[in-house]
Image (tube, rainbow, N blue to C red):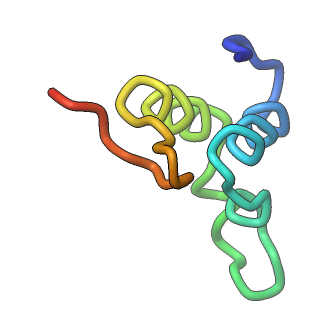
């Protein structure tokens, strides 16, 4: 599990690989023009670390909040 990142693309790659996000959720497409402005490097990093610290992937592949959080 990688913990240091050089750029947003590396963070998005981890979100896609570890948490089954789609990369299009973090970049502009023709239908969602404002997404890239929101998902900055810092927001992507905070989101990834929040997921790692407070959630886990259950046996069915769903994201579940850890107990006590």
The x, y position of residue 37, in whole percent, is 65, 58
Which quadrant, please, contains the N terminus? top right
In the visual, does 50 lie left or right of 60? left
Above-or-below relation of 45 to 17: above
The x, y position of residue 43, in whole percent, is 54, 39
Number of on-image labels: 0
The x, y position of residue 7, in whole percent, is 81, 28
The x, y position of residue 17, in whole percent, is 77, 42
| Rendering quarter of residue 13 | top right
In the visual, does 43 lie left or right of 30? left
Which quadrant, please, contains the C terminus? top left
Q: Nearer the viewer, residue 8 or 1?
A: 1
| Rendering quarter of residue 50 | top left
In the visual, does 59 lie left or right of 2? left
- Residue at 58% across, 32% down: 42
Instruction: In the displayed orientation, state which residue is furthest to the bottom.
Output: 31
- Residue at 60% across, 39% down: 44
């Amino acid at each position: 599990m990688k913990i240091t990142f050089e750029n947003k693309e590396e963070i998005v790659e981890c979100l896609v690989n570890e948490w089954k996000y789609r990369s299009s959720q973090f970049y502009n497409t023709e239908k969602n023009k404002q997404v890239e402005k929101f998902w900055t490097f810092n927001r992507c990093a905070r989101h990834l670390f929040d997921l790692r610290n407070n959630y886990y992937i259950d046996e069915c592949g769903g994201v579940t909040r850890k107990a006590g959080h």
